[in-house]
Structure formats: C-alpha cells, structure tokens
Image: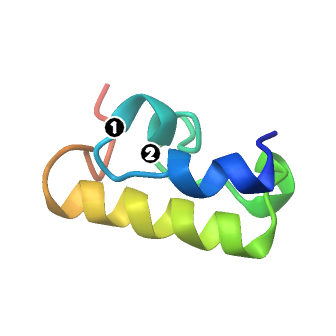
C-alpha cells in the first residue's frame, strides 16, 4: 500500500484523513491482514490512531 521509506514520514496523529482509512465502519482499527502493512507500520498506525483518539481528534465509537 505504501512504500517503506515514505511511510515513516507520512504517519502523523494529526493527519485524520489518512488514519480514517485504517478504521472500519464500527470504529475499530483494521488488522494487518486487511491493510497489507508490515508489523512496524501497523504499530505506528495503531499508536497514531490511539493518540488521536485521546486528543479527541478521532472518535472512539462511530454513532449512527
């Protein structure tokens, strides 16, 4: 999905549009198998999503 060199600079907890691509309809973080990321990339995504949720940039749950 993303190149290894460019991925490190792309991940930021303030980039909400990018992080929403890795969250499913229920608000859960998508698995490595479905995103196609390696372990380090998935951990960075997860950490950024959790940080954004804590700072109220992303919701914890999606309400209907």
Assign a secondary structure to mark 2.
loop
User: Could you say where residue 19 lies in the image, as x and y percent from the top left?
Assistant: 47, 42
User: Could you say where residue 33 lies in the image, as x and y percent from the top left?
Assistant: 86, 58
- What residue sits right under mark 2 in the picture? 27
Assign a secondary structure to mark 1.
loop
Query: Which residue is rendered at x = 73% and y = 54% of the image?
Result: 5
Q: Earlier in the sequence, mark 1 or mark 2?
A: 2
Residue that sits furthest to the front in the current view: 5
Circles 1 and 2, Cβ within 8 Å, touching? The answer is yes
Answer few, some or many: residues within 10 Å of disc 2's Cα (few below 14, many 20 plus, some between 14 and 19). some
Answer few, some or many: residues within 10 Å of disc 1's Cα (few below 14, many 20 plus, some between 14 and 19). few
57 on left or right of 44 = left
Q: Nearer the viewer, residue 10 or 40?
A: 10
Query: Which residue is rendered at x = 72% and y = 59% of the image?
Result: 31
Tell me which colouring the rendered structure shows: rainbow
Instruction: Identify whether 40 is placed above or below 5.
Output: below
Instruction: Identify whether 25 is placed above or below 29.
Output: above
Quadrant of image for the C terminus: top left
56 on left or right of 13 = left
Q: Which mark is residue 62?
A: 1
User: Could you say where residue 32 lies in the image, as x and y percent from the top left?
Assistant: 77, 61
Quadrant assignment, res 8: bottom right
User: Could you say where residue 60 lies in the image, as x and y percent from the top left?
Assistant: 29, 53
């Amino acid at each position: 999905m993303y190149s290894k060199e460019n991925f490190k600079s792309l991940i930021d907890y303030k980039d909400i549009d990018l992080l929403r691509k890795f969250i499913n309809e229920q608000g859960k973080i998508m698995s490595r198998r479905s995103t196609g990321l390696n372990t380090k990339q998935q951990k960075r995504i997860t950490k950024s999503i959790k940080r954004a949720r804590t700072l109220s940039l992303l919701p914890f749950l999606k309400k209907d």
